[in-house]
Image: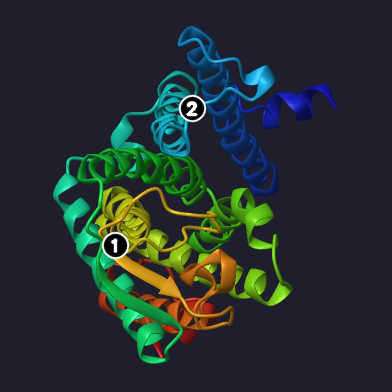
Amino acid sequence: MKQLLKKISPFNNRTDMPVSLFVIKKILAFWVCYMAGLFTAEGAVILLHFALGKNMLVGDVFDAGTITIITYYGYIIIVGAALLYWKLIEKKPLAAMGLSKRIGTYFIGVTVSVFLLVMSVIIIVLTGNIKYQGILENADILMIILLTGGFIIQGAAEEILCRGIVLHALKEKTSLLTAMIVSTILFILPHWSSLFAGEMIYGVIGIINLILISVIFSLFTICFKSIWAACGLHSFWNAILYGVLGLNLSGSEETVTAIFNMQSVGNNIWNGSLYGIEASVATTIVLAFAAALIFAMGRKRIKEPPYPFLLLLSL
């Protein structure tokens, strides 16, 4: 038992073990980095409150906008934890986790995020389930810029964990399919509680959409041999959805500010109800089409035989 625990411990870079144990080892590494960053960030927020004269024990906290900014910028601690793990424990260069010099591919991800969101929202608007009410006159541009910076950090943090540490490490010892499945499951789990806060149908559609977007992130990572495109897509999907369109992001109760005034009409599978368009069937259609297209275009760069579920995407 002692030898087994040493093998799967995330605090060493041993690889001399069966594939199943290696998968467990990388799952543990994910949670160590995620939880270390999360708890450190939470502690920093508490200390910041008290340092600025706020007493959280009696409900004296920052306003919603400040809390949102602090939350997303706090992901820098998770980034730091992940990079330290990679350098000190894995003992590998950052390029080996996808942080290569191909940073220009980041803007490909940004462009794709705009296209996917615009297509999804247009479909929902045409069905009458989101109402466009023009540009907000009181949009807080500074807050939008700050939010965008926070989303850049938050999206990068999740991609460094899921596509950097997990996908890149696993694909060296397991099949690409296994690496994609494990990274997708770990990508979904932190969203689980908000997914099923409402009716079951929206949680199910939300999971399908998370699987599809995770497949897209993984395909981008494999095709571009870096995680920069996935980071750009992930970060600016969140930034545009929340800070520009003013729509719910992963079940967020309300937006702090936005450029456009857009409101959901009723609660249904087209607008995703309280969870937002990430639990919409319109988004499912757009993401499925995008995943199929990206796979078809990048198929030559995927060196392993096409697996059944990827073949379905390419049909």
Name of the residue lying farthest toward the front = 137
Residue sitting at x 39%, y 60%: 217
Mark 1: amino acid: Cys
In the picture of the structure, the residue carrying the numbered disc 2 is 62
Across and down, in percent, residue 108 comes to 19, 60
First reached walking from the N terminus: tag 2 or tag 1: 2
**239 up-or-down from 7: above or below:** below
Q: Is residue 172 visible?
A: yes
Q: Secondary structure at mark 1?
A: helix
Residue sitting at x 65%, y 36%: 28
Across and down, in percent, residue 130 comes to 41, 79
Q: Secondary structure at mark 2?
A: loop
Residue sitting at x 53%, y 79%: 309
201 left or right of 81 in image: right
Mark 2 Cα shell of 10 Å, populated few (<14), some (14-19), many (≥20): some
Mark 1 Cα shell of 10 Å, populated few (<14), some (14-19), many (≥20): some
Q: Could you say which quadrant of the image residue 304 lies in? A: bottom left
Across and down, in percent, residue 245 comes to 32, 64
Q: Could you say which quadrant of the image residue 229 lies in? A: bottom left
**223 up-or-down from 160: above or below:** below
Disc ID at residue 223:
1
**Considering depth in this image, is 258 or 229 the residue closer to the camera?**
258
Specify the quadrant that holds the C terminus.
bottom left
Specify the quadrant that holds the N terminus.
top right
197 left or right of 278 in image: right
Name of the residue lying farthest toward the right = 1
Give the number of marks: 2
Q: Is residue 299 visible?
A: no
Across and down, in percent, residue 40 comes to 55, 20
Mark 2: amino acid: Phe
